[in-house]
Amino acid sequence: MPEIKLTHVTKRWGKFYAVDDLSLDMEDNSFITLLGPSGCGKTTTLRMIAGLETPTSGQIKIGDRVVFDSEAGINVPANKRKVGFLFQNYALWPNMTVYQNISFGLGNIKEELPVIDEEAKALKSMIKALENPGELVKLIEECRDKKGKLDLDMVYLKLIDNYTISIYTAKELYNYKLHEAADKESAAKQKKQELTAKLDSILAGHKEKREELNEKFEVVSGGKVVTKVRKYSKEEIDLAVRRVSRIVKIGMFMNRYPAELSGGQQQRVAIARTLAPEPQVLFMDEPLSNLDAKLRLEMRYELQRLHVETGSTFVYVTHDQMEAMTLATKICLINNGVLQQYEAPLEVYHHPANLFVADFVGNPSINFVEAKGAQGADGALDLTVLGGLHAKFRPAKPLDLSKWFANRDEQAAKRAAELKEKASQKGYVEKGNKDEVFRYHIAKVDEEDDSLLDLPEITNEDLVLGIRPEFIDIADEGNLRGEIYGAMPTGMESTIKVRVGGFLLTGVVFGSSLFTIGSSVPLSVTGDQIMLFDRKSGQCITSGTLNF
């Protein structure tokens, strides 16, 4: 399957930038999740790649093919991009059966396709089935009810699944009535000879035309597969429907209508319909949002399995971070149309690029603690936190904080110069939805409206610590004292809120301990993945240990 490459892609309406200068490389056979809050631009990004939305500028490539280029004037229509799109609303036809819903789109496709000898293909399948008449008869006999009557629908389904054939070939195979023959071996041998002779005659006809059939029964002439603009045959359509029904496990529902299916079954039908044309890329726009929590979990496993079985590139839009973390090979986190971070899930979780990423990813939410201090000669930072407590932050890797600040200022000046240059160009439109440093939340016992306060003057001594809840532990050796403010047991662990002065810290404590509200407890901050952020830019500086 192809990779997808976006280069400086922008989409705006007037001064509103839905997507702002987005560049991405989505690797072949990857599972990419586009994650972010509502209105951040993730669905717009998906629709632009699929061809359902036209970018304002930039270039989009799917594989080696440029499907959009604003400068070259290229904009390949959606139906020519070989992609599948699974919408939030399953959009199943209520008056059509499952089979008809899946096959509907296939019947409307007309494009250059290989010429296939369907008769030869069917003959080969039936000859193979007749090689073991005992197994064939056994499959048929297994479909009798308590009264001994054959369930033909079940017979056809068993033949289809066992021999990977179409419904039409299955019916013809059944009509040989091998199960009714007195001498089944002889009857199968005779029929096999008839079919073999017929197949040999077809192959001889191709040879006379200086043609041959490959393993897919495609006509080959002069070493090349013969193609022509045509529609799918009924045999091809049925085989495609049966193929995807096996993948998503809905073969038994083919004659049902959408109203007769559960939400999860309807979702499977929608997926099957999208997979039937064998798209190079599968796009999904919050496909699980209409399902209950249990069913969503089950469908996540199914999507993981589908990704492996199909070998397709999946691009998945969600605002649910749990879905993003569990499904993705890479997470593309977007805010206000701007790419914030594009990394593997655990990399995004443990090494967020900025305050926004750290806040958005993780449940329970990360603890933000404002800190003030400077780096000492030993490389550690002496900090004042939580209303006057002293702490020492030691970076996990060597850090020269003054050089980091100098580089920050240099990059900021460079971006300002680039923006100035861009603003001077013809056709430039100033962004109305301005990008700002994320305003993190400090949890306090007595909350106050920050909007009413004067903005403080930020210096290089103003920092922010990011502490994941799992790194806050109740331990006898802890040097930090707190008071239990609240506790929520969730089974194997408890989520607690601990009061330290006028501040609240969230922790996750593993085990089945009971906590008494108001009780004093010793706290420790463990691990070397405590994050240090620059308060001015919001960028993550480094990670390390924190001691009180």
Image (cartoon, rainbow, N blue to C red):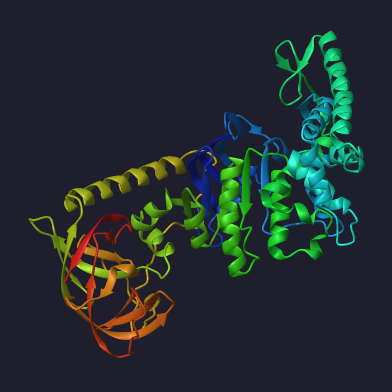
* Whole-percent x, y for residue 474 in the image: 26, 77
Residue found 54% across the figure and 50% down from its top: 19
* Whole-percent x, y for residue 534 in the image: 27, 59
- The part of the image, by quadrant, that contains residue 241 is top right
Q: Quadrant of the N terminus?
A: top right
- The part of the image, by quadrant, that contains residue 485 is bottom left
Nearest to the observer: residue 1 or residue 502: 1
Nearest to the observer: residue 290 or residue 237: 237
- The part of the image, by quadrant, that contains residue 289 is bottom right
Residue found 20% across the figure and 65% down from its top: 546
Q: Is residue 56 visible?
A: no
Give the side of residue 230 with respect to residue 75, left or right: right
Residue found 68% across the figure and 62% down from its top: 264
* Whole-percent x, y for residue 381 in the image: 15, 61
Give the side of residue 148 with respect to residue 39, left or right: right
* Whole-percent x, y for residue 356 in the image: 40, 61
Count the marks: 0
Nearest to the observer: residue 221 or residue 287: 221
Residue found 40% across the figure and 64% down from its top: 359
Nearest to the observer: residue 354 or residue 418: 354
Q: Is residue 299 above or below residue 504?
A: above
Give the side of residue 162 with respect to residue 209, left or right: left
Q: Quadrant of the C terminus?
A: bottom left
Point out the residue furthest to the front here. Answer: 183
Q: Is residue 506 visible?
A: yes
